[in-house]
Amino acid sequence: MYHLDEIRKDFPILQRTIYNKPLVYLDNAATTQKPLCVTNAISEMYNTLNANVHRGVHFLSQRATDLHEAARERVRSFINARSAAEIIFTRGTTEGINLVASSFGEAFLSEGDEVIVSTMEHHSNIVPWQLLRDRKGIVLKVIPIDDAGNLDMDGYEALFTQRTKLVSVAHVSNVLGTINPVKRLAEIAHAHGAKILVDGAQSTPHFAVDVQDMDCDFFAFSGHKVYGPTGIGVLYGKESLLDSMPPYHGGGEMIARVTFEHTTYERLPFKFEAGTPNYVGTHALATALDYVSVLGMDVISAHERELTAYAMEQLRSLPGIKFFGESAEKDAVVAFNIADIHPLDLGTLLDRLGIAIRTGHHCAQPLMQRYGVESMARASFALYNTKAEVDAFVAALDRVRKMF
Ligand code: PMP
């Protein structure tokens, strides 16, 4: 059973007020709030177990190493990777994508080779490829979308040529909420001899992910969006592919032997983890993954889908509302504009009523251009949000609307 009252007690920040109003936090696609077990894991680690990992023979170092490597195993099982060697710890989704652009790009892409992204990508899945384009002369191609926010699958297939080497797409759009058919996208990419990277920043918090089932070659996500701390993330890659790629950063931890003449590299995943890892972050991330797994990703998903459908239904009754993203396969994100109220004004006035939403371009300016707007308002839901909060949000929105 899903006991929201009990669950909400796990998140102390949800009890606070903003301008003397109860906080209604609907900016979960930007980052989620943290349960006590996660913040406790961080303070316990620093207060009782802190030591640098991997190189120490002493008790604390070994214990910290055990927790850090146990976290890797925890991530492996969370996304159902075949091996823990395929789990590379990063700072977040952005770093994971940059790692692939840099390392896969170095090994496998040359002038004229093509990378496919989609119209709905976050800037972090656009700019790294543009940087690579500047360095290597690759060609960036873009999958079109329809008005409801679905990928144009025929348009996708039509983009492939002999030179297409990689597809890089969001699992779930952080604006439209569209859940992209990544399994089918992967099949098509593979049929054309290309690899596929899936940006899982907005999927891992909301439903169970299985990298073997979707058969992606790379999968990146961020800890802070799935109730873990900031500054920790994961890049999954198929082992044989990662093995064939050069290191991304050089330094300690990633080497086997160094002389001034020649350096050999550590085995996976350490080859891609130069420097002291964020071992407190990995342990806290594993704690967060345990937390959502105990609740059950399927249960979380059902709750959030219901809440999103309810929010859409309530909002639809407001005159002048326009939604962006009405795919049948939609996750817990509602992007909208209302009448000709500027989203920034909307966000500012809602804030005075204790309601946190996000407004702006959502790091997806090409998507804004696709819909012919500069900015949108966005409410996004998490496992702890309630129908009462949706009601408060809709009532506040109506109040603000009437002020204009
Ligand atoms: N991709 C998507 C779809 C996102 O929503 C985000 C975060 N808004 C990112 C990538 C980047 O994640 P991070 O900033 O944690 O690296």
Image (cartoon, rainbow, N blue to C red):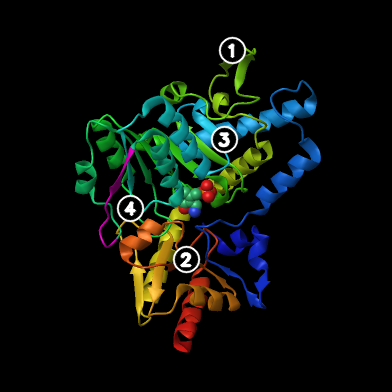
Say whether disc 4 or disc 3 marks the residue closer to the N-terminus: 3
**Where, by quadrant of the figure, is residue 274 drawn?**
top right
Say the numbered circle drawn on residue 262.
1
- What is the secondary structure assignment of the residue under circle 1? loop
Q: Residue at x 68, y 61 (%)?
A: 12
**What secondary structure is marked by label 2?**
strand
Nearer the observer: mark 3 or 2; the answer is 2
Mark 4 residue type = Thr
Q: What element carries label 3?
A: strand
Q: Position of residue 40 (x, y in %)?
A: 72, 48
For mark 4, does the 10 Å Cα neighbourhood hold few (<14), some (14 to 19), or many (20 or more) residues?
many
Where in the figure is residue 355, as x and y percent of width and height?
56, 73
> For mark 3, what is the residue?
89
Q: Quadrant of the C terminus?
A: bottom left
Identity, as a three-letter code, of the amino acid under mark 3:
Phe
Amino acid type shown at disc 2: Gly
Mark 2 and 4 residues: CB-CB less than 8 Å, in contact?
A: no
337 to 3, vertically: above or below: below
In the displayed structure image, the side of residue 187 where residue 55 appears, left or right: right
**Residue nearest the observer in this picture, 388 or 163:** 163
Rounded to the nearest angstrom, the CA distance separating label 4 from label 1 is 43 Å
| Up/down of 268 relative to 46, above or below | above
The residue carrying mark 2 is 360
Q: Is residue 51 magenta?
A: no
CB of mark 1 near ligand 1 (< 8 Å): no
Q: Name the residue under label 4.
A: 119
Q: Is mark 2 within 8 Å of ligand 1?
A: no
Location of residue 374 in the rendering, given as x and y in whole percent from the top left corner: 40, 67
